[in-house]
Image (spheres, rainbow, N blue to C red):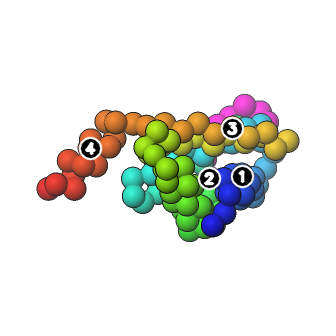
Amino acid sequence: MSTVSEIYSRIGQRIVDSIGCKWLTATLHIKYIGGVKTFLEYQTDNGEVENTVLQDSFKNMRDIKELNAIMTAENDKNKWNKAIFTVTPEGKFNVEFIWDQKLQNKIEELTKE
């Protein structure tokens, strides 16, 4: 099993590798609902916001699932179903984990049907 730091590093590197031009910040939006949905956007050096496909999406999905398992292994205090990874070209990195109860309720409602 990987460490949280190793997972962060791999996800960050995939974000960087996915952008083929000069950029200021990149943001990977994640929804984790048993499966993984991602959306990668970045701000170009002229201020425009673009989006692109995240490279190695299968490996990224596996890392996100593992990260969620690590964080929720001991208790539900660290549970999340959304995350926002923000990266700069200099390697600065921030992660925000979010619990969206409305999203969870919708998923539970759909699985009952």
Q: Which residue is mark 4?
A: 106
Say which element carries label 3.
strand
Q: Which residue is mark 3?
A: 94
Horizontal side of 31 relative to 44 (left or right) equals: left
Horizontal side of 48 relative to 64 (left or right) equals: right
Name the mark nearer the viewer: 2 or 3.
3
Crowd class of label 3 (few under 14; some 14 to 19; many from 20; radius 10 Å): few
Give the residue drawn at x 74%, y 40%.
93
Closer-to-camera residue (4/22): 4
Q: Which residue is mark 1?
A: 5
Horizontal side of 87 relative to 82 (left or right) equals: right
Q: Which residue is mark 2?
A: 52
Give the residue drawn at x 47%, y 57%.
36
Name the mark nearer the viewer: 1 or 3.
1
Q: What's under tag 3, amino acid-wise?
A: Asn
Whole-number angstrom distance, CA of label 1 to CA of label 3: 12 Å
Q: What's under tag 4, amino acid-wise?
A: Lys
Q: What's under tag 2, amino acid-wise?
A: Thr
Crowd class of label 1 (few under 14; some 14 to 19; many from 20; radius 10 Å): few
Whole-number angstrom distance, CA of label 2 to CA of label 4: 27 Å
Image location of residue 38, percent across then percent down? 52, 52
Q: Is residue 84 above or below residue 61?
A: above
Give the residue drawn at x 63%, y 67%.
1
